[in-house]
Amino acid sequence: MIELVSESRCVTCDVCVAVCPTNVFDRGPDGIPVIARQGDCQTCFMCEAHCPADALFVAPLTHPVPEDSPLRDEAHLAEAGLLGSYRREIGWGRGRKPGARLAVGPELGRARITPAALS
Amino acid sequence: MITLDLTADVVVVGGGPAGTWAALTAAEAGADVILLDKGYCGTSGPTASGGTGVWYVQPDPAQREKAMASREALGGFLQDRRWMSRVLDQTYENMNRLEAEARYPFPVIDGVPHKRGVQGPEYMRRMRSWIKRAGVTVLDHSPVNELLVDGTGTVAGVRGHRRQHNSDYRVRAGAVVLATGGCAFLSKALGCDVATGDGALFAAEAGAEMSGMEFSTAYAIAPAFTSVTKTAYYGFATFFRGDGTPLEGAGSQGGRSVIAKELLRAGTVLCQIDQATAAQQQQMRLGQPNFFLPFDRLGIDPFAEKFPITLLLEGTVRGTGGIRIVADDCATTVPGLYAAGDAATRELVCGGFTGGGSHNSAWAMSSGTFAGRGAAAFAAGLGAAATRRKLTGVGATGIRPASSATGVGRAEAIDVIRREVHPYDKNYLRNGSRLRPALAELDAIWESLRGGAVADGGNLAGLRQAAAMVAHARWMYTSALARTESRGMARREEFPELDPNQYHRLAVGGLDSLWTRAEPVTGRELAIA
């Protein structure tokens, strides 16, 4: 679920308010979006992908993380390179090569069935 | 409250791939088009947040034959060969247009663009730009609440609410395309919480029928407590019990029911993607970056460590049921109403089974194209009379209560959905002894909703979504009970065999009292020839 809107990075463009498919954000009084309906977040990472300032972080869990979780700690997320990491991987943003250009997955063969005993 | 009053030749409801292709095609046919998305066209729906293969096959007879034949047995031989051919043709054309006209950056291998898949965010961002360039008016965050019909029952518009503007709206239209997606019952599967089956409810209220609703048992593998479903990559996995011993017979294909049974029994199944070579691991990262979001963010190495998994319901998003299609232009049984993508039945190309996304994405773009063209032609045929019709809303539950009884709302309905539709032992591992009581619970909540449901805090769209999910589940279980055999993904524990006497499609319909009807399978003559 969406856990962080970085006030220091946010450029108040309100793109996240517009693009969130489940209308999770409200525009705050100072223009910085507020996570108004976190329970409606479907953890689709779309807001993060569209944020031009890498100001959002979506924790990969479908329930809220505890308040003291590192997944809500801006300094930790920046340090770990996680802020904006999805946008980087899909190659969005100035000067980046679109990830779509590279998106060739492995050939998918017949799926493996787990055997009784593993050698 | 101010009501925005609009007119259009064609209204498209839903902004995923099917809706955007429908809007594009209708606009190119000269129609004035309004596309309404309850979220945001470009991000909402499972395609936008995921990535998908596309059933893109060169127009070579041998390759086409192989592509069509390969999944017929899986689908219980319910596909229509003529439709499969048209979808292959249309998908081929659309993918080539996506490259040439929307400048989609396909990977280039040995100088050749590789058009067998798309990355969701890039695809849908480009579709949004493309339809706007084509002159389509896009209204985001504008859920439709009901269809409007004229005096003859012909669909002639929609009514809804713009939630970020707090204003209602009405669109008077020549024709309506429903491209609202399937129904995943708020399971939190990636990008699926907007897929609540809304279009099927609207269509049924206008008199349309459903088909293939028994083929709705799709559950996807995801790391426990996450949303990221990408079952195909679990083909490289080994599965384990909670104590680390191998879970014999478990697999992403042909062994998912073993996983469901173990989750029911013990609550835990572990997994490790230990069968991918180093090269395959790298390709997986490039192919589906979002697959790795949960792992990277939780500090798990999925190739080297065991991690817990779950199964998330995908209902008719990956199931094949939906609004019944009765003509080549994706017309429904109601004049003026067209359906496309997951909202429409996919039996025509998939029969009773879908696994991979590639047939689904091909169906979305081609059925969207057919429906957009059909709707534009229908609207043009109406001429100037289209705007002089007297319109009536047909929305029942939550809008026009059947009685003055009150007390039931969205929360209660969603609670019943979680209890009666999500559990593996009801919806996936199906048995009449468990389906019947579940259906009785769904019938009871439907009756309460129908009586006099209240929209909490004015959230009519939320209440209508809950009603759509309940209606969807009732069609699913009613059809599942009518099919006393195992065919495609519709399996019954007590009827494990395929019954040659049930070689038919099942239409289902009704709102308060439901019915089913066997429909002969069409389009097989080509298969025999």
Image (tube, coloured by chain):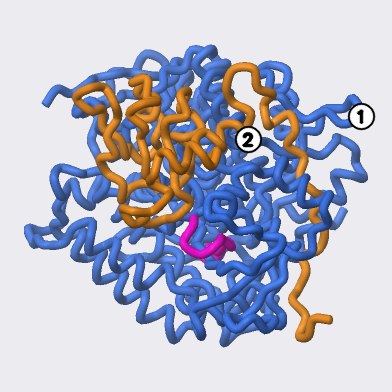
Q: Which residue is mark 1?
A: B110
Q: Chain of mark 2?
A: A
Taking the spot 35% from the left edge, 67% from the top edge, the residue there is: B418
> Residue B287, located in which quarter of the rendered image?
top right
Horizontally, residue B229 falls left or right of residue B350, namely: left
Span shown in magenta: B214-226
Taking the spot 27% from the left edge, 44% from the top edge, the residue there is: A37
Q: Chain of mark 1?
A: B
Q: Where is residue B336 drawn, in percent x and y?
A: 43, 33
Frontmost residue, B213 versus B155? B213
In the image, which lettered chain appears blue? B
**Residue type beneath disc 1:** Asp
Q: Which residue is mark 2?
A: A89
Q: Which quadrant: the N terminus of chain B?
A: top left
Q: Secondary structure at mark 2?
A: helix
Q: Tell me if I can see residue B335 in this picture.
A: no
* Chain A: drawing colour: orange
- Vertically, is B374 above or below B267? above
Circle 1 packing at 10 Å, graded few (<14), some (14-19), many (20+), is: few
Frontmost residue, B377 versus B403? B403
